[in-house]
């Protein structure tokens, strides 16, 4: 996948460019701080990956380090495949291929699908509901409560989700019993109404009207904005995406 196209600002952006803009106009916050500013409490994120069939094994102390390497490779039109993140086998336990196929199938516009997975911390209060994949499977849309317990709906790098355990001790696991028939729009409306992420049973008792308000999302930090500004200079089509929101990819519930 190659992110850059022509220098025409009016050219229709590709889906990869749209996803990239979403990922760079917001940041994952854990508590009140951006994830990348958190001082690692434990260890680095270990990755095994290949770029154009060349295997690499690396450890990264900052979420931004891996992100920069991946973006550089994708900008060069190279193929990036991740095989392991964190402990051996944990990546595929959290994101098995069957789940990734379902998330990919949901990656279409105007589709208010039900969440397809629930991640949670058995030793804490952290919860994530995943709806679709982005950026060729390197990111997902998630409704989560990592930012001071308040519900946030934003795209997240999968590497950031995986790095929560080694760096901050937040060990998310996948709820293998999770299943819901209610669309993500209902969960978003309930989150705005209650200030938290509710389960399907509680959804049935709430007076939902089908109006999906936009939850507040943490802005991108200065360093992430600078990276995106550089991408905009190299690819002017991205400039028109700075005010776009992932909510535009979801139809009303």
Image (cartoon, rainbow, N blue to C red):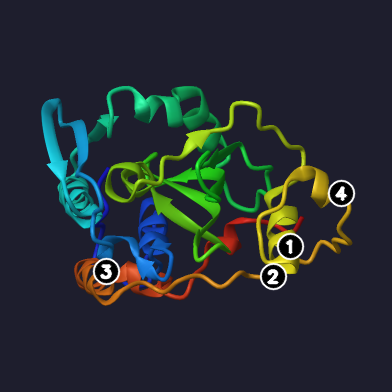
Residue 216 locus on image (x, y percent): 56, 73
Residue picked out by circle 3:
224
Q: Marks 1/3: CA distance?
A: 29 Å
Q: Earlier in the sequence, mark 1 or mark 4?
A: 1
Q: Nearer the viewer, mark 3 or mark 4?
A: 4
Which residue appears at 31% of the width and 45% of the height?
163
Q: Earlier in the sequence, mark 2 or mark 3?
A: 2
Which quadrant of the structure image shows residue 96? top left
Residue 5 locus on image (x, y percent): 26, 57
Residue picked out by circle 4:
204
Q: Which mark is residue 189?
A: 1
Q: Earlier in the sequence, mark 4 or mark 2?
A: 4
Which residue appears at 42% of the width and 53% of the height?
156
Q: Identify the element where label 4 is drawn.
A: loop
Circle 1/circle 2 CB separation < 8 Å: yes
Which residue appears at 50% of the width and 70% of the height?
217
């Amino acid at each position: 996948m190659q992110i850059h196209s022509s220098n025409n600002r009016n050219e229709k952006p590709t889906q990869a460019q749209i996803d990239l803009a979403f990922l760079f106009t917001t940041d994952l916050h854990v508590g009140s701080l951006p994830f990348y500013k958190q001082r690692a409490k434990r260890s680095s994120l270990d990755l095994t990956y290949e770029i154009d069939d060349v295997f690499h094994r690396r450890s990264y102390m900052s979420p931004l380090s891996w992100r920069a390497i991946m973006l550089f490779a994708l900008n060069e039109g190279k193929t990036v495949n991740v095989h392991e993140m964190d402990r051996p086998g944990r990546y595929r336990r959290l994101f098995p291929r069957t789940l990734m196929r379902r998330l990919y199938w949901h990656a279409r516009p105007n589709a208010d699908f039900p969440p397809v997975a629930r991640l949670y911390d058995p030793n804490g209060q952290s919860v994530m509901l995943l709806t679709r994949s982005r950026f060729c499977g390197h990111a997902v849309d998630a409704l989560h409560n990592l930012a001071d317990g308040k519900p946030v709906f934003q795209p997240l790098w999968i590497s950031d989700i995986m790095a929560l355990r080694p760096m901050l001790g937040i060990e998310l696991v996948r709820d293998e019993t999770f299943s819901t028939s209610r669309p993500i729009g209902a969960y978003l409306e309930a989150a705005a109404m209650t200030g938290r992420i509710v389960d399907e049973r509680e959804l049935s008792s709430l007076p939902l009207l089908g109006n999906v308000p936009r939850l507040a999302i943490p802005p991108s930090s200065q360093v992430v904005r600078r990276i995106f500004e550089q991408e905009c200079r190299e690819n002017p089509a991205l400039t028109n995406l700075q005010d776009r929101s992932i909510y535009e990819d979801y139809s009303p519930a």
